[in-house]
Image (cartoon, rainbow, N blue to C red):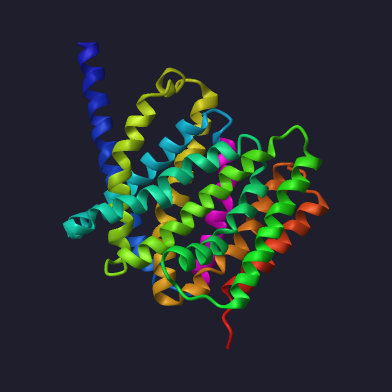
Amino acid sequence: MVSNSLKFNRNKYNGNFAIIFLKSLNFANIFLVVFMKESKWIILAVLAIVWGSSFILIKKGLNGLNPIELGSVRMISASVVMLLLKGKHVASIPKNKYKYVAASALFGIFFPAFLFAYAQTEIDSTISSIINATTPLFTLVIGALFFKLISQKRQFFGVFIGLVGCILLILTGSSIHPEQNYWYALLAVVACVLYAININWVKKFLSDLRPVQIAMGNFAFLLIPASLILFTTDFFSHISTPETQTAVLYTVILGICSTGLASLFFYRLILISSPVFASSTTYLIPLVAFGWGILDHESVHFAQVIGALVILVGVYFSGKKNQ
């Protein structure tokens, strides 16, 4: 009798928890609709904080997870929550666009999630955030080379400056921190190249879809491969340890906020402002990441600050058009 009573209470608790969880998701959905109608400056600030915090969350997640586990948990948590919030939009995606949406998910989320996780096993979160700022530079180059987008001389000058800054950052980092393998920084660079491919890919093949369709299509595609990959790891054999549970908490926050909600905020920002204004998050993200790095006692050398400034100058010129 005692056992049945406990079973009944547990089921009742689980049922109540499910109701509370679904209601909280509905509240979050209402919050998204209301919040994203607000000032572009508010959304810009939120994006800078959320994306700027993603690198320290990766670092904390790696304290109990390996890069494969972290990338998988990140995508699963983002996909589950976002599909519960906005999953109805998946059905409205035209069938002839499925392959393009799937490719966008691979370029823009899947591979970068693992690459940044692997990179941060050797480099600091602040360095990772600075390398992330090269995405607009690669977007310009790839757009000109493979998508026939017209660019101006000033923009290519910015690309050159940015790449010099990136090389300076990696070389100075390897000399200042010989205990770290700065070749891993190249993994973050590859991730930025994939981000750049995705931006141009979306512009060329998915510009007729609404942003929410693209985002939800990405998450719907990612849920299965990310889940399968997680099951190939020994994640479930050590999930009960406090260290792993803390790492999972950080990673779930990373997935829901930095991968899931931020994508909707960013698309909304583009709609209510302009791509140029939206790209200004590039300048703010490293500032937030630097703040977290200092709080987490990461050492940043003056030469690395110079490299970061050179990259941001390059990003500025690459994004600036002649009048």
Q: Is residue 150 above or below residue 139?
A: below
Q: Residue at x 59, y 40 (%)?
A: 119
Q: Main structural element of the magenta stretch: helix, strand or loop?
A: helix
Q: Is residue 51 one of those drawn in magenta?
A: yes
Find residue 105 and report its horizontal and vertical position in percent.
36, 50
Q: Which residues are magenta?
A: 41-60
Choose top left, top right, bottom left or bottom right for residue 62: top right
**197 left or right, relative to 242:** left
Q: Quadrant of the C terminus?
A: bottom right
- The answer to whether any part of residue 25 appears in the image is no
Q: Is residue 220 above or below residue 18?
A: below
Count of marks, rendered view: 0
Q: Looking at the image, can residue 311 be seen?
A: yes
Say which of 299 and 250 sits in front. Answer: 299
Relative horizontal placement of residue 107, taking residue 87 as reference (left or right) = right
Front-most of 93 and 261? 93
Expressed as whole percent of the image width and height from the top left, the position of residue 305 reads 76, 56
Residue 276 is a magenta residue? no
Residue situated furthest bottom in the rendering = 323
Quarter of the image that includes the N terminus:
top left
Vertical relation: 225 (above or below) 208: above
> Percent position (x, y) of residue 259?
44, 50
Which residue is painted at 56% across and 65% down in the image?
Answer: 281
**Residue at coordinates 66% horizontally, 65% vertically from top-left?**
160
- Image location (x, y in percent) of residue 219: 32, 48
